[in-house]
Image: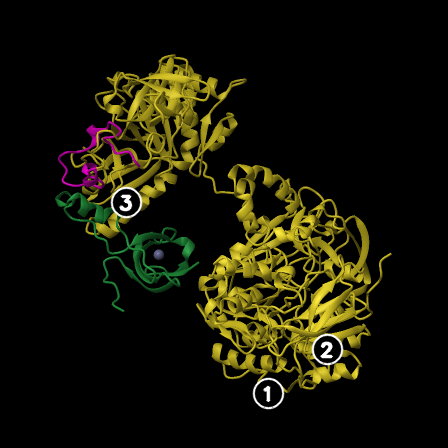
Chain colours: A yellow, B green
Amino acid sequence: MTKNLRLKTGKAIDETYRISFKFNGSTYYGFKGDTLASALLANDIHLIGRSFKYHRPRGIMTAGSEEPNAIVQLHNDSSRTEPNVRATEIEIYEGLEASSQNCWPSVNFDIGGINNLLSPLLPAGFYYKTFMWPASFWEKYEYFIRRSAGLGKSPTKPDPDIYEHKYIHCDVLIIGAGISGIMAAKIAAKNGLKTLLVEEKPNLGGSTIYQNSDHFKINNQNSGSWLEKEINEIKKLKNLEIKTRTSVAAFHGYNFLLARENLTDHLPMNQRNDKTRHKLLKIRAKKVITATGSIERPMIFDNNDRPGILLSSAIKKFADYFGVACGEKNILFTNNDSAYETAISLIQKGINIEAIIDNREEVNSKLIYEVEKNNIKIFKGYTVANTFGYKRINKISIMQLSKDGQKVVGPKIILSCDCLGVSGGWTPAVHLFTQSGGKLKFREDDQVFLPNIYPSDQLSIGACNGDFTLDEILRNTPKSLIKYLKIKNTDYDNLEVSSSTNKSKRNIWLLPSDKILGKTKSFVDYQNDATAKDIKLALREGFRSIEHVKRYTTTGMGTDQGKLGNMHALGIVSETAGAKMGELGTTTFRPPYTPLTFGTIVGRNVGEYFDIFRKTPIHDWHIDHKAEFENVGQWKRAWYYPKENENMHDAVQRESKAAREGAGILDASTLGKIDIQGTDASEFLNRIYTNAWSKLAVGKCRYGLMLNEDGMVYDDGVTTRLDENHYIMTTTTGGAANVMGKLEDYLQTEWPELDVYLTSVTDHFATVSVCGPNSKKIVSQVIPDLDLSDENFPHMSFKNAKIGNINCRVMRISFTGEHSYEINIQANYGKSVWEKCMEAGKDYNITPYGTETMHLLRAEKGFIIVGQDTDATMTPIDLQMDWIVSKKKYDFIGKRSLYRSDTIKENRKQLVGLLTDDPNEVLEEGAQIVADINKSPIEMLGHVTSSYYSPNLKKSIALGVVRGGKNMMGQKLIIPMEKKNINVIVADPVFLDKENKRLNA
Amino acid sequence: MFIINCPYCGEREQSEFKAGGEAHIVRPKQPTELSDDEWAEYLFMRKNIKGIQFERWNHTHGCRKWFNMVRDTSNDEIKAVYKMGEKPPVD
Ligand SMILES: [Zn+2]
């Protein structure tokens, strides 16, 4: 039987709208407006999960995104299930199903809880120290650790939800819609600035909106009512866009921010269909105003982690905002005035308070007087020494603090309770500020880090800038905005404010107890189970840098990034090591501020939209003819065209034979094409290619090899001289963009004096390549007016022609070693020219072939593919292509590097042909090549780069790079494979038609 | 994500640009006259400074022009941009 702890008056709750949900299989009820946390607390459920290392029972600690403990697995189905969801952030909806994570078999009986008993054996760095040695044991440990550790379950099926990305540009972005954010939004928008206000919670107004106390008044109204009117006013402002449920995940340089707008997570499942779940907003703001508020600090004492121990401000929010009492016997424990605000709220609502424990001795505060008037016992100068109760706190022991706060003195008093609210003061939420590159300063008075140096055009206001009291916020916010926005005045310049808070605080990072530290469990990082003892141990073991202490103890490394306990970790380090807080620095907060789903990050870029792909103008024909495709860069290229029942090998063998015996046709449109014009075009080509270009006649084509300045082969292709000062260069498919960039670089930066203009025309032309003994007959039918005689149109030459009245360029060039023509035509005619060729070739067995056959045919001829037979370590000499390196030219890119001491070495890896002893044995590309299998260690000489079964030669052929291979002709080498060693002989890389008879036929 | 003020186009997102390494390294006019060490100095040796650095950038997805940038690598502040061939700003 569970109790009902719902009160009548919750600001955010709609009691007419009841919602059922499931937690760990049982059904519960809450109201519209509830978070999972508030709904569970209303049902008197505190125990939510188990801690990561010791599997200690843990409950709800906070009411916001800083929650370390109450993290749940949401949804049951394998496509939507989501781990690490904070119960304090998820709004309940009809049909919500949540379960505890990090416990097995159940949250009430958890086997890992035994770690709690073993905890003296599990100090900081335990995993590093123990499980890493001996290394071979890791496999055994891992099984148990992973099974009991459990960080929740990830979905196993694709995410069915829709995510989007959106760019937003604005004059002013305001992060956080608490009181200072609301004021900033009104001021900015009313001054004509295009303003965006984002708030992570569903409602505006922060903690002030549920403030209903005579102690906090603005212009004689309760601060909550005053703010409500302001909110209603700003909603009417035209210049202002307001986004709720929108949390800023990252604040990058130059005011570029990422925010997640949550659109459907609060809706019942049946209302989410076809709606975008999250939007990732990419915001570029001229100015950013951070008003992210502050996070209440817990306090560090023995057993400070039991279910039922919450932040004092969270208890207040659950009562005021959600209408939920966190317990029936509440005790508050504080070192400042905040807990008394909570007490006054609870008194107003008739919730019982047993006692208040205050570290401070005597404080002159109106809030305290009011609480005392209600006959609530206040223990001044006391601390909580220990707490009791396994799955829920049931009592505490308190003791008096010594004058210096280092010890406890006097007798122990036991108080029973079912809820303990803790307030250790406030930590400004400077996470986003530091993400942006901001530098912090330390304020000794109340031991907080504050924004100091802004790295971009931005401002922090309100509690995140250290203004914690209402009067400070209302006084300072308008002032700093007048200065920041360069305006004359604001609506808020003459507010009357009354605020009862006394700012005094007695800060003790690690509270003393009557036990020695080694016997205590005072948690600093709740999610990762790092204790004060662990931090001290790290210091004893010699760690000094806070970044090292963090990694060694795992403090601050959970999904909450230690939003609660990081300050205490710093405090304990500084006290123990005798260093000043301000000099110690802080650990780095990294994006995202709260976790993002992968769906949000990738947006619409999933499935076929994962990357851009490019199609040739002939693509549809390939699809119609059942081509398989391969990705080459961003291009989809026809790979092979299987006929019925053919596998890839069969298809490629058929295509390869047909291309040499009848005719083959290839879509070569993807090759990069660069139009080069200008009076210095020839000189330019001389400088960028290894061979000479000045003497190339108009109408002729030449193959060129391009090097990097380091002498290594970069790209290759055929360039044609169209006119005196006009060339068209082809590049490899994958290299086109880079070659273009490289050429532009040299032209603009090294040789600006050259009169040369480059234009990428890859997409402008479709290229149809027809090869084989029948190619001439076919092309002559497609372009009847063209003289294809060998005298007038020899190999490596070019002609302008017309198909109908459409201009085209025809090159007689070949990558297969066959007599072959390339027809280049305006892209939109590509498919019709291709079809004309197919029609003309019908009687000649014209066979479309894809990239695989192209690779096979060129390998028969020993033509290299840059990027397959080369990597960035092959010179033309290594490729046995000395013939293409001009000896006469004074300079070209990479020339000087060809005779560096390393590039002239004899035993560099060099390209050779490889023939297997068994002609049917086809080598694996990438396989290693060795000479002596018995030597230990075996010396690797190189690897196979290209390998095929050649149907034309009826044997296996391969290319490979071998150390010193140039001088190994005829020598036996070995390819050691998993099951056998394959014998090969080093051969000439040109396997077919070395005399080029077929080319010129 | 910087905003870069291309000297030809004006302010654009960093994603339109590509960085091209250290600026003001001139390709030797007579490489063949250089020793291996001198050539290696040109080819490989680059500065990587924490602080003010002179760099080349290319507006790849815009005007395709190369230009120079003075950037403080410690905070990514862009101090100046100027065209190729122009002298670097003194302060
Ligand atoms: Zn530009």
Where does ligand 1 appear, by image quarter?
Answer: bottom left
Q: Label 2 neighbourhood size at 10 Å, few (<14), some (14-19), many (20+)?
A: some
Asked if A808 appears above or below A107 in the picture, the reply is above
Q: Going from the N terminus, do you reach mark 3 or mark 1 first?
A: 1
Q: Label 3 neighbourhood size at 10 Å, few (<14), some (14-19), many (20+)?
A: some
Magenta-tinted stretch: A873-901
Residue A422 percent location from the top left of the image: 68, 69
Foreground residue among A831 and B56: B56
- Mark 2 — residue? A379
- Mark 3 — residue? A743
Q: Label 1 neighbourhood size at 10 Å, few (<14), some (14-19), many (20+)?
A: few
Asked if A449 appears above or below A744 in the picture, the reply is below
- Chain bearing tag 1 is A
Residue B23 percent location from the top left of the image: 27, 56
Contact check, label 2 and label 3, Cβ < 8 Å: no
Q: What residue occupies the far right of the structure in this picture?
A: A1
- Chain bearing tag 2 is A
- Chain bearing tag 3 is A
Q: Quadrant of the N terminus of chain A?
A: bottom right
Query: In this rendering, does residue A260 appear at all?
Result: yes
Q: In the shown orientation, is residue A279 left or right of residue A416?
A: left
